Amino acid sequence: MNPSSTRAPFPIPVVAAGPGSRIEEEHLDYISMPQGMATYQSPILPEPEEMRGRDGALRVLRATEAALQAAVAGQAVAPVSLAGLSEAELALVNQVLGEGEVAARVLPAPGLGEARIQESVFAGVWRVVQTEADGSVQDTIEVGDAPALLRAAARADALGSRPDLLSAPAGVMNAQPILAELEDQRQRFGLHAEAERAQLPAHVVNLSLLPLSPEDIGFLDHVLGTGRVLILSRGYGNCRITNCQVPHTWRVVYYNSQDTVILNSVEVTELPEVACAAAEDLADSLERLTEVLAWVAQG
């Protein structure tokens, strides 16, 4: 007989027996993972007759459909302006587009404007409301993996100088090699042309797996800085993304449904993938929007 065949399958709890023995139950406190996932939900569509006399809204939606067609074909597309729409027309556009899983803000700064961005229920179709420093407002719809403003604001934030890595205070143990690794990856990333960067995989440093002291965390925050771009994604659980004040660097933090951090990372990339719509998303959005417009155009 093979000796291994007499072994009981693992695991079997071993319980001591006899006088003085006791059974102790051990409970592992696992961090619960997200329980829900945001999925596409069709917007509540207006009745076709509600579109009568609201040609501006239909024009904007048709232009958005055309922009999606161009984007799916790999062409660059210009934003669709919502200027000149009446309140009723704007309400209809909002109703058809709905709100998707990604929202973003570009925070104001001296001499600079701010922006509010909301992805629609059609992935890759973004509502961008930009307020300039002089108070003027641009309300547009952008089609693409992400609004251009997010990358532009992150690049602008990275133009300033940052503290020297060698000026670490007492108590910092592991932050400096992490920062050196990130700097090396930024240098490598910056060697590629801008058109190539979107195709490069992100370099991810998982801070959750590293032994970091409070001084390490503080020094990382001090050297990397926090920029003006804030992105929230509700795809599977919640994800908070902020740009750093060094080039091509982002803080990406995932939370479960109890708002407990389950992953804290730094990514060297043009824009974290979790904030972007994929090419397949754009093709799917084109199909869905075409179906919606076929309905509303019946009026």
Image: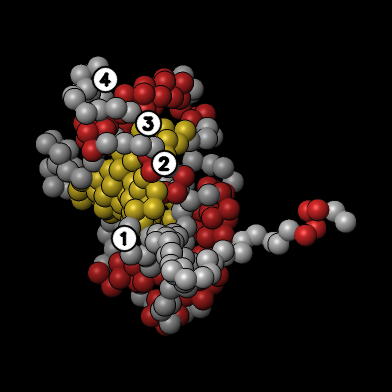
Please state which of the two labelled residues, at mark 1 or mark 3, is closer to the viewer: 1
Q: Amino acid at mark 3?
A: His
Kindly report the distance in space between the C-alpha atoms of the residues bearing marks 2 and 3: 22 Å
Kindly report the distance in space between the C-alpha atoms of the residues bearing marks 1 and 2: 19 Å
Give the residue at x 71% y 62%: 8
Indicate the secondary structure of the residue bearing disc 2.
helix
Q: Residues within 10 Å of mark 3 (few under 14, many from 20)?
A: many
Q: Amino acid at mark 2?
A: Leu
Q: Which residue is mark 2?
A: 209
Q: Earlier in the sequence, mark 1 or mark 4?
A: 4
The tag on residue 259 is 1
Please state which of the two labelled residues, at mark 2 or mark 4, is closer to the viewer: 2
The tag on residue 165 is 4
Give the residue at x 36% y 71%: 95
Q: Which residue is mark 3?
A: 248
Foreground of the two, 256 or 148: 256
Q: Is residue 233 left or right of residue 217?
A: right
